[in-house]
Amino acid sequence: MNPDKEKWVLLVLLSVIWGSSFILIKKSLEHFSPYEVGALRVLIAGIILLPLAIINIKKFPKKHLKWLILAAVTGNFIPMFLFPIAETKVSSSIAGIINSMMPIFVIIVGALLWKFQTTKRQIVGVVISFTGACILAFSGGEGGEFKLIPILLLLLATLMYAISTTTVKSRLSDIPAKILSAFVFSFVLILPSMIALVFAGFFNNLEVNSSLWEGLGFVSLLSVFGTGLAMMLNYRLLSVSTPLFASTVTLLMPIVAIVWGLLDGEKLTLMQGFGGVIILAGLIFLRQMPPAKK
């Protein structure tokens, strides 16, 4: 597929998958603590991808190990705990709006750490879409409720996503996406996630019943699609586009969250629809620019 078309296909797929993560986190929190949700999400992905990692063990990038660990911890471990913790205190719309700030963090981190060049038009496109995300998020009933600590946690998680994204583009883009995902979750994160699960008291409070299996079902969906598959697609997107373009997936995610809300019985307001149109307008504006050069 033509790289220009491929990046837009990947963007839409990631928007649907990651946009569905909020409702899966919410459902998972009905059965497990935030720490258990985060640890299970990483562990399940690691176990599933372990065979792929073992098969390709000779391709393990030893010379880039420090960058692999940095990308794994900032993009695939700590945020997996921060989002569930925050979502016990704030609405999914607040989580969505903070996550939509990732392109802005990518611009900042990319400029400071990796000397990425960003054009004025790209910045304007991001600002337009971010404005639409704000309208979308705060048009709901709970959207205006601010709680400082959870919001700071979400900001930290989004900043870490930006660090991971720019690190992968700058130092790990030569590793195939599926192999990189396998290395990240299997060789780097399986052991830390198991330790986290122990400290979270998962095994002490383990009781086999229908609630456990239902909860594991939600976490497994979140892990397989929202973590393992999504990261493969994200790494591939980074290889055929820029970090800033890849990060715009977070601007489309609130739209997917609204769709899930409608399916769950929520009402779509005029302001929410208007916010969605503004987000798309910003992405179209951004699309018209050639990829930024490093």
Image: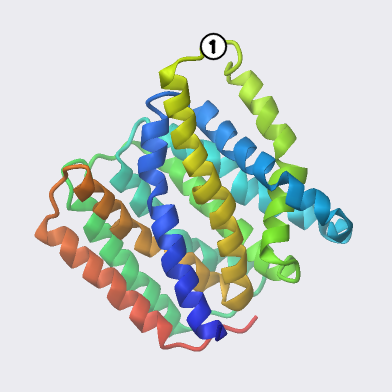
- Which residue is depicted at the point 49% across and 35% down? 219
Q: Position of residue 108 (x, y in %)?
A: 54, 66
- Which residue is depicted at the point 68% across and 47% down? 49
Horizontally, residue 55 falls left or right of residue 19, namely: right
Residue 104 against residue 21 in the figure, above or below: below
- Which residue is depicted at the point 74% across and 52% down? 52
- Helix, strand, or loop for circle 1? loop
Name the foreground residue: 184 vs 153: 184
Name the foreground residue: 120 vs 190: 190
The image quadrant where one finds the C terminus is: bottom right
Q: Position of residue 21 (x, y in %)?
A: 42, 47
- Which residue is depicted at the point 17% across and 53% down? 139
Horizontally, residue 51 falls left or right of residue 115, namely: right
Q: Position of residue 3 (x, y in %)?
A: 56, 83
Residue lying furthest left: 270
Q: How is the image coloured?
A: rainbow
Please tell me in which quadrant of the rendered image residue 130 appears: bottom left
Q: Position of residue 106 (x, y in %)?
A: 53, 65
Horizontally, residue 197 falls left or right of residue 255, namely: right
Residue type marked 1:
Asn
The image quadrant where one finds the N terminus is: bottom right
Q: Give the class, few, some or many, for how many residues have Cα within 10 Å of label 1's Cα (few <14, many ≥20).
A: few
Residue 254 against residue 211 in the figure, above or below: below
Residue under pointer 1 = 205
Residue 113 against residue 294 in the figure, above or below: above
Name the foreground residue: 73 vs 236: 236
Residue 88 against residue 278 in the figure, above or below: above
Please tell me in which quadrant of the rendered image residue 291 appears: bottom right
